[in-house]
Image (tube, helix red, strand yellow):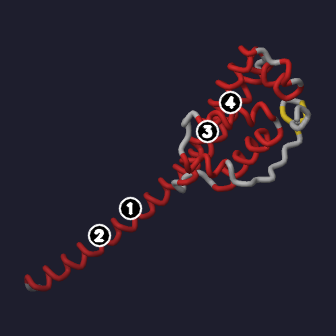
Amino acid sequence: MNWDAIGAIAELLGSAAVIITLLYLAIQTHSNGKVLRVNAIVDAQMSFVAINEKLSEGGVTSEILFKTLSDSESLTPYESMLLHRFLRAVFQRLEAQFALYTNGILNPEIWLLRRGYIMALVEKNHLIKEVWELEKQNKMFTKAFIEEMDKESHSEIAGFMGVNASSSE
């Protein structure tokens, strides 16, 4: 065999190795993207699990949210401030999920479920709506997030914390 033939075979093997490497990288990139999206869903779920766990422990936050949904006029100014801080944290968690959604990482169904749930509470309870309106004015959230949240939603929620969500309208 001459050197030209050996060189041609080496070029062919090199090209095949490049193609195999590119295919491997494409598969790994796709796999990593899938893992990233799954992790985003898990993180989104765990974010709301943390809220639910906090509320299920009882305590001040649970009591305040219960009063907000069942007898909002009985909140003291201090309780109103605590409610505001808690809801700000909920909205901030939701904005983090919105960022994942808009960047194609969080599944659209998960985003729509989260948005719908929170906006149903906003639409059904005047105090929660007040907090949302204040937070928008406080410049706590991006314009894109506010616009997304304020889209007409017609969200329905049967109840929250054992209280009919619309009972305090």
Q: Nearer the viewer, mark 2 or mark 4?
A: 4
Q: For mark 3, does the 10 Å Cα neighbourhood hold few (<14), some (14 to 19), or many (20 or more) residues?
A: some
Residue 136's mark? 3
Quarter of image, res 134: top right
Q: For mark 1, does the 10 Å Cα neighbourhood hold few (<14), some (14 to 19), or many (20 or more) residues?
A: few
**Judging from the image, what secondary structure is the residue with disc 2 in?**
helix
Q: Is tag 2's residue or tag 4's residue first in the polypeptide sequence?
A: 2
Residue 17's mark? 2
Q: Is tag 4's residue or tag 3's residue first in the polypeptide sequence?
A: 4
Residue 88 in percent (x, y) is at 63, 30
Residue 40 in percent (x, y) is at 57, 45
Kindly identify the residue that appears in the image at 84 percent across and 25 percent down.
72
Q: Nearer the viewer, mark 3 or mark 2?
A: 3
**Judging from the image, what secondary structure is the residue with disc 3 in?**
helix
Asked if 21 appears above or below 146 in the picture, the reply is below
Q: Nearer the viewer, mark 1 or mark 4?
A: 4
**Between marks 1 and 2, how big is the CA–CA gap?**
12 Å
Q: Nearer the viewer, mark 4 or mark 3?
A: 3
**Judging from the image, what secondary structure is the residue with disc 1 in?**
helix
Asked if 9 appears above or below 65 in the picture, the reply is below
**Judging from the image, what secondary structure is the residue with disc 4 in?**
helix
* Residue under pointer 1: 25
* Residue under pointer 4: 87
Q: For mark 4, does the 10 Å Cα neighbourhood hold few (<14), some (14 to 19), or many (20 or more) residues?
A: some
**Between marks 2 and 4, how big is the CA–CA gap?**
55 Å
Kindly identify the residue that appears in the image at 76 percent across and 19 percent down.
57
Q: Is tag 1's residue or tag 3's residue first in the polypeptide sequence?
A: 1
User: Which quadrant is the N terminus positioned in?
Assistant: bottom left
Q: Is residue 144 left or right of residue 90?
A: left
